[in-house]
Image (cartoon, coloured by chain):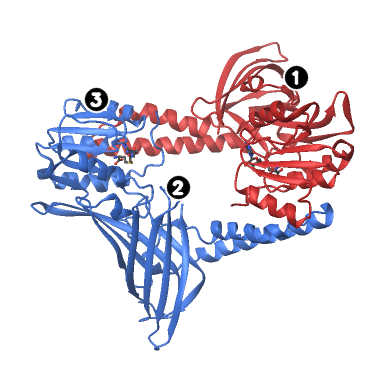
Chain colours: A red, B blue
Amino acid sequence: GSVDKGVDFAQYFCTYSFLYHQKEMLCDRAVLDVGTGSGILAIWSAQAGARKVYAVEATKMAEHARALVKANNLQDVVEVIEGSIEDITLPEKVDVIISEWMGYFLLRESMFDSVICARDRWLKPTGVMYPSHARMWVAPIRSGLGEHKMGDYESSMDEWSNFVDETKTDYGVDMSVLSKPFSEEQKKYYLQTSLWNNLHPNQVIGSTALLKEIDCLTATVNDILEVRADIRSSITLENTRFCGYGGWFDVHFRGRKEDPTQQEIELTTAPSVDYGTHWGQQVFLMHPPIHVSDGDDLRVSFSMNRSNENHRLMEAEFHCEIQQTSGKLIPRFSNKFYIE
Amino acid sequence: GSVDKGVDFAQYFCTYSFLYHQKEMLCDRAVLDVGTGSGILAIWSAQAGARKVYAVEATKMAEHARALVKANNLQDVVEVIEGSIEDITLPEKVDVIISEWMGYFLLRESMFDSVICARDRWLKPTGVMYPSHARMWVAPIRSGLGEHKMGDYESSMDEWSNFVDETKTDYGVDMSVLSKPFSEEQKKYYLQTSLWNNLHPNQVIGSTALLKEIDCLTATVNDILEVRADIRSSITLENTRFCGYGGWFDVHFRGRKEDPTQQEIELTTAPSVDYGTHWGQQVFLMHPPIHVSDGDDLRVSFSMNRSNENHRLMEAEFHCEIQQTSGKLIPRFSNKFYIE
Ligand SMILES: Nc1ncnc2c1ncn2[C@@H]1O[C@H](CSCC[C@H](N)C(=O)O)[C@@H](O)[C@H]1O
Ligand SMILES: Nc1ncnc2c1ncn2[C@@H]1O[C@H](CSCC[C@H](N)C(=O)O)[C@@H](O)[C@H]1O
């Protein structure tokens, strides 16, 4: 059994706030918590008045959840079930599905697949999803990280080059045929892998654009296999460097159209000085940056797919052209990134 | 395909030196390189005069090996075969098996299993293993790392404790039932996981003891599933701190009893000021350290097993009693570690 040491507990409190403010949605209802972890959301649901909470957890964490439920004297309401949501059965359909399924840049790790499966099998036709909606956002950013990464890439290539020389001179083996694949591998690693970052809001240099909106009640696995969007962003800073893109997400708790919450709650992972989350933002850096200025118009075609090698990871592509206020057009350029 | 960026090329040169100095062992012989990676050992074998080299590699690295062989005009001698050594077939038995199979603390990653398999299927009865022998060593050490790790553990527990208090006061959930499993998890992570370290020779505070000697020609998978040894070590420093154990290995290239090399080569990963390797040493720290002095006699029962959860990883146990020069006996104390 293991208690995840990486957990950022701040998220619990954010999420809790919706359970607390939306008691009316849980009172006397049957609830399913998909991936209960330590059991905390299940417990809060019970405290908010749920009639019954099924708390499903695939890992040995289920044992801790059971202990925590017991210690809080909620074992009559919360039933912890160890198993994959795909495999288990419940004695009834539920009114509410809650889950903290969001990965980096929303979809990394693909846990939403499991939530969809839970919904299609166990949610009543009148049921409510918690969260009910999710959105992905992107904006142009400036950042000094790109230079660091470029420096790392360059010293790695310098080392390689020395190694190739030495191997040739001292050991009679010509390794230069591997220089190209080696450099591609290093580029991928240092320059084309997106980074976790806690952006400061003033690193965002243009308007934020919506990449995707998900209605958790109706989205299918197919809908989230790929994300595609043609978006625009206007640069909002005089004379600055367009270093790449920042991506993040938010989720909402609105209940259901026929059964809306009294008060809508938002959990956002946008750049913020005071309210960082463990999700941070996903940063995609270009090499080198491009000089832009106030009013320049970015037109970006974005696409994101699951990686063939590991479907929990993803690949993103940005095709961008820039219409400058001067009238000049910077023709389309493309950047591909791995989200690992 | 990928060129492993983590490779420390220094090891090639060490290993090369044996191929270079033992040309007589390779001349006109058929050689199998188990896990050829970039193909470098296969190429050196060919350059040393081998008649034929079969270079087997399980990953896409095989493509790079093939390109490297071609670029060095050795495609008539070196045949690169992509596949697991367990699955492939060769057109003949070989005179020599070479492999760079050693993991951290020799046996982590368990690649020697594959070398044994190759030997039992493809080595002629008169064949030679390269390396021919391997040994594991341990010695008592001093180190400041233990205090760091203890500090990390303590701040993690402080954070947890604040979290438990807040959750109780502000959110009405008593999480204290998870404090014990959480602390055990954190202890395991910070205090009971062995560490990679490049020890300075003056951190070794007592005599070095042999844990295991492996004859690569005869060892079975069973022989290396478990390592057990009762060893002794004398403290060689006045008034010092016994902070834990350092472990490392060496391998030898001796040929075979009936067919010994003219010159024996050793590759050691012992603590060294000038000749560090990417293997470093494996460090097992105790909390707190124990005061010892010159002449104190450590009697240690050591055992190491593969972890049940992941057989490429291992668990080690040290039971130690100390006979002090004063005559006093510090009774047996035990430490368990995870090698991850
Ligand atoms: N298919 C599946 N079935 C059951 N549990 C799953 C699952 N996929 C992921 N999980 C679990 O879902 C959890 C997501 S982390 C969220 C934990 C908890 N609800 C909280 O808010 O703190 C993990 O514990 C993971 O093991
Ligand atoms: N069972 C197996 N069959 C074939 N190759 C294997 C294997 N197990 C591990 N390997 C490969 O063995 C290599 C070990 S690293 C050593 C690479 C090279 N001989 C050198 O000296 O630089 C890795 O490339 C790994 O992919």
**Number of disc labels:** 3
Of mark 3 and mark 2, the one earlier in the sequence is 3
Q: Are marks 2 and 1 on the same chain?
A: no
Could you tell me how far apart the alpha carbons at marks 3 and 2 are, in whole angstroms?
38 Å
Residue B333 x, y percent position in the rendering? 47, 74
Secondary structure, mark 2, is loop
Q: Amino acid at mark 1?
A: Gly
Q: Amino acid at mark 3?
A: Lys
From the viewer's side, name the closer residue of A295 and B179: B179
Asked whether residue B202 appears in the rendered view, the answer is: no
- Residue A43 lies left or right of residue B113; in this view the side is right
Q: Quadrant of ligand 1?
A: top right
Check the residue under mark 2 and report the chain it is in. Answer: B
Check the residue under mark 3 and report the chain it is in. Answer: B
Q: How dense is the environment of label 2, judged by Cα within 10 Å: few (below 14), some, or many (20 and up)?
A: few
User: Against B182, is A220 above or below?
Assistant: above
Q: Which residue is mark 3?
A: B70
Closer to us: mark 1 or mark 3?
3
| Quadrant assignment for the N terminus of chain B | top left
Closer to us: mark 3 or mark 2?
2
From the viewer's side, name the closer residue of B194 and A170: B194
Q: Which residue is mark 2?
A: B310
Could you tell me how far apart the alpha carbons at marks 1 and 3 are, in whole angstroms?
54 Å
Secondary structure, mark 1, is loop
Residue B164 x, y percent position in the rendering? 74, 57
Q: How dense is the environment of label 3, judged by Cα within 10 Å: few (below 14), some, or many (20 and up)?
A: some
Residue at 75% of width from left, 19% of height from top? A295
Q: Which residue is mark 1?
A: A295
From the viewer's side, name the closer residue of B6 and B184: B184
- Residue B42 lies left or right of residue A122; in this view the side is left
Q: How dense is the environment of label 1, judged by Cα within 10 Å: few (below 14), some, or many (20 and up)?
A: some
Residue A218 x, y percent position in the rendering? 74, 21
